[in-house]
């Protein structure tokens, strides 16, 4: 089973902020997990059990925040940011809801 990648508007914006070489490296890394994503991901604590959110480490400094929809074989890329900022932004946004 090969999953398809789907990028949110936020993830596209995050990619545009990166320099070209880093953006290419991030995209290559994301495409490399399409065959078996769960092998590479870590579930984020505090997410809903019925719809968990995962993090994917890309090199030393970047993290992708992902959601997986197994029924339709889609990996939804929610955010791509520096590791120090990504979790802070993600949890702050969730607590405001």
Image: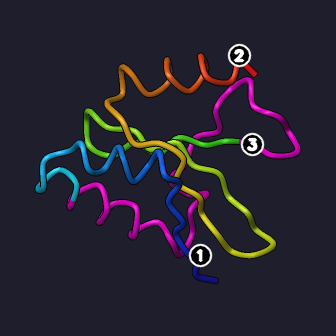
Q: CA distance from mark 3 to mark 1?
A: 17 Å
Q: Is residue 53 above or below residue 40?
A: above
Give x and y (percent) for residue 34. Answer: 51, 72
Q: Residue at x 75, y 68 (%)?
A: 70
User: At numbered mark 2, what does the secondary structure look like: helix, strand or loop?
Assistant: helix
Residue range highlighted in magenta = 24-52
The answer to whether 9 is drawn above or below residue 65 in the figure is: below
Q: Residue at x 56, y 27 (%)?
A: 90
For the residue carrying disc 2, how many other residues have a C-alpha within 10 Å: few (<14), some (14-19), or many (20+)? few
Q: CA distance from mark 2 to mark 1?
A: 29 Å
Q: Is residue 79 left or right of residue 22?
A: right
Q: Earlier in the sequence, mark 3 or mark 1?
A: 1
Image quadrant assignment for residue 49: top right
Residue 4: x and y, percent? 56, 75
The answer to whether the residues at label 3 and label 1 have Cβ atoms under 8 Å apart is: no
Dot 3 corresponds to which residue? 52
Q: Please give the count of numbered marks on the rendered protein.
A: 3
Q: Nearer the viewer, mark 3 or mark 2?
A: 2
The relative height of residue 89 versus residue 16 in the rendered view (above or below) is above
Q: Which residue is mark 2?
A: 95
Q: Secondary structure at mark 1?
A: loop
Asked if residue 29 lies in the magenta stretch, the reply is yes
Q: Which one is earlier in the sequence, the residue at label 3 or at label 2?
A: 3
Residue at 47% in and 45% down: 10
- Find the residue positioned furthest to the bottom: 1
Q: Position of residue 48 (x, y in %)?
A: 82, 34
Image depth: mark 2 or mark 1 in front: 2
Which residue in the protein does label 1 denote?
3
Q: Quadrant of residue 39?
A: bottom right
- Viewed as shown, does residue 89 lie left or right of 73? left
């Amino acid at each position: 089973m090969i999953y398809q990648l789907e990028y949110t508007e936020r993830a596209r914006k995050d990619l545009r902020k990166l320099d070209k070489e880093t953006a290419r490296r991030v995209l290559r890394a994301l495409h490399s997990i399409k065959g078996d994503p769960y092998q590479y991901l870590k579930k984020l604590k505090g997410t809903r059990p019925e719809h968990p959110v995962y993090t994917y480490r890309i090199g030393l400094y970047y993290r992708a925040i992902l959601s997986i929809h197994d029924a339709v074989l889609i990996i939804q890329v929610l955010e791509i940011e520096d590791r120090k900022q990504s979790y802070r932004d993600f949890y702050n946004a969730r607590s405001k809801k």
